[in-house]
Image (cartoon, grey):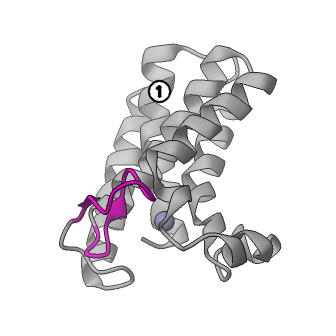
Amino acid sequence: MMFKTHLMFGFLLGLFGIQYLHPSNQVLFIIIAMFCSALPDIDHPDSKIGKNVKIIAFLFEHRGFFHSIWALLLVFFLFSLTLGKVYVFAALIGYISHLLADAMTKEGIKVFHPFSKYAIRGFIRTGTLGELIVFLVVSVFSVYKLVNL
Ligand SMILES: [Zn+2]
C-alpha cells in the first residue's frame, strides 16, 4: 500500500485507540500511531522514511523482517524504553495497521519471516483503483469516527 493509505489506516485505528485507551495527550497518541503506520516501509529505499536511511533497505529485504511479527516485538521493546504504556499501544496500533493494510495486497506479508515462508495475502494491487477505493473508504470512516469520538 502507498504512504497516504498507510497514514489513513494509522489515523483510523489510532482514533479507535483513543476511544478505548483514553490517552491524556490525544494528539501525541495519533502522531505516534501515524508515524508507526509508515515505519515498516523503512525497508524500501524509495519510501518516505526509507529514503532517509537507505542502509536499512540495503540490508533488509522489502516486506521481510520489518513486515514480520518480530519487528512488531522490536517496536514494542524500543518504544517501551522511552514511552508510557498507552503511547506504546499507539506505536503498536500504527505498526499493526501497516501490516494489516499490506496483508490485503497481492504481495502480502510474511508474518514469520525469515523462519517461515507463510504469507497472508489479499487481492488488492498497490497503487491501483482497488487501493484508491480502500483509501477513500478508510478516509470516510475516519472522518465519521473523528466527528463521533
Ligand atoms: Zn509495507
Residue 101: x, y in percent? 36, 58
Q: Is residue 11 visible?
A: no
Along the line of sight, which residue is nearer the eye, 22 or 92? 92
Along the line of sight, which residue is nearer the eye, 6 or 146? 6
| For residue 5, above or below residue 128 | above
Image quadrant occupied by the C terminus: top left
Q: Residue at x 23, y 65 (%)?
A: 121
Along the line of sight, which residue is nearer the eye, 62 or 6? 62
Q: Residue at x 54, y 14 (%)?
A: 22
Residue 106 lies in the magenta-colored region: yes
Q: Quadrant of residue 48?
A: bottom right
Q: Is mark 1 within 8 Å of ligand 1?
A: no
Residue 57 lies in the magenta-colored region: no
Q: Is residue 82 visible?
A: yes
| For residue 71, above or below residue 108 | above
The span shown in magenta is 105-121
Mark 1: give few (<14), some (14-19) or many (20+) Cα within 10 Å.
Answer: many
Residue 125: x, y in percent? 29, 80
Residue 118: x, y in percent? 26, 58
Q: Which residue bears the numbered disc 1?
A: 17
Instruction: Tell me if 47 is positioned left or right of 121 in this view.
Output: right
| For residue 49, above or below residue 10 | below
Q: Residue at x 67, y 39 (%)?
A: 32
Residue 126: x, y in percent? 36, 79
- Residue type highlighted by circle 1: Gly
| For residue 92, above or below residue 137 | above
